Amino acid sequence: RLVRPRAASLLAAGSAAPRRLLGSGAGGDRLAADARNAGGDGSTHLPLPPFVDESLRGVGQVVFSNSAGSGALMLAGLGVGDPYLAGLAAVGAATSTAAARLGGLDRAALSAGLYGYNGTLVGCAFSVFLGSSAPITLAATVAGAAAAPFVGRAITPLCGGAPPFTLAFNAITLPALALVRPFGAKMAAADPGAAIEAGAPPPAVEAALTGVMDLLLSPLTGVSQIFVVESPLSGALLLGAIGFYSPGCALATLCGSSVGAAVGAVQAAPAADIAAGLWGYNSALSALAVSVFFVPTPAAAALGLGSSAAAAGIFAASAPAFAATLATPCLTLPFCASAIAAHLAGNRLPGLILAPIPHSPERNGRAV
């Protein structure tokens, strides 16, 4: 089995990198935000102070779960894989929520947690990729998360009627990472075995070193990579937290991650990358987005699978390009591109029906 240190694993096609890539993705325009939960599958209201409830829902909304209970379970699952990251994820969610409150942003969206998820991801990404001391990383998380609600509002009109998903997170995080260049020469020197093009073993040999069980668990690890954690156990706990909100959403997430891993295998990607979940997280989010925004039909199921495969294909092209030019990961841009394209397909293709109030497959199916 290949063993690499926490801060020095590989990305995809071309450079040494931390193995925890990003993912995520809740999101929606304001109209979808307002609607996105009037209660629902697993979204029971806990007796919490409003600010705590909104912040926990922000964590849940990374995977479209408007539930404080799901958000709390997700933080616990992240803590199993990386307690430091879980702490910064909580800081990011709370900071974004506080900034939206102080800024007087839409109360319905705030109550649904839709101003917290980008900040959550900022904390996750900075904890892994920034490479700075804890105080500096904390300060960067607070600054980036505080800007996230306002960046999201500015981006929304540019999406042609589709939700912006995690574009605000990418817009905030990528410039910061481009300054520190986490996939630069220093990391390659720290872990020369992580380079994919330079001296990596053939796929068959690497598959043997990686282990069959790691590959079988890769869909769960892909789920954990949504939050930049590499842990099948965390992935299973996160999947359970999603299932607490909606079993249908959990199934879509797992199927999407499996499709991404399969695309990686077909493209003969390094087995260690597949096992680390790098091919799964964008695809998991893409399938999940389709399950949330569309009425469940055979055409929607096909769209979910196609969107997952497209996200993996975009990841295959964009990951090495970002690594080579900016020395950064591509974050969740493949998911955003795939999900926005799927949403814009909307009612234009036969059999596809946008849910009038996006929520979950269970509730979307009852709404028509």
Image (cartoon, helix red, strand yellow):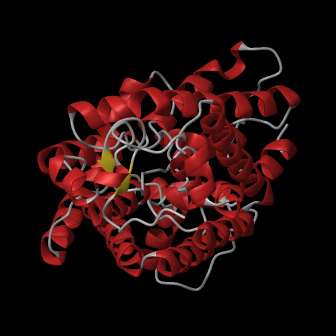
Q: Is residue 368 visible?
A: yes
Residue at horizontal 48 percent and vertical 33 percent from the top:
315
Q: From the image, which quarter does the C terminus lie in?
A: top right
Q: Is residue 37 visible?
A: no
Q: From the image, which quarter does the N terminus lie in?
A: bottom right
Residue 220 at x, y = what percent? 65, 60
Q: Nearer the viewer, residue 297 or 85?
A: 85
Residue 84 at x, y = what percent? 35, 78
Q: Nearer the viewer, residue 45 or 246?
A: 246
Residue 187 versus residue 259 in the image, above or below? below
Residue at horizontal 62 percent and vertical 76 percent from the top:
69
Residue 190 versus residue 319 in the image, above or below? below
Residue at horizontal 38 percent and vertical 74 percent from the top:
90
Residue at horizontal 67 percent and vertical 69 percent from the top:
236
State which quadrant residue 246 falls in: bottom right
Residue 262 versus residue 342 in the image, above or below? below
In the orientation shown, which residue stands out farthest toward the bottom?
A: 47
- Left or right: 210, with 149 as reference point: right
Residue 348 versus residue 64 in the image, above or below? above
Residue 148 at x, y = what percent? 29, 51
Residue 135 at x, y = what percent? 14, 76
How many marks can you see?
Answer: 0
- Left or right: 9, with 290 as reference point: left
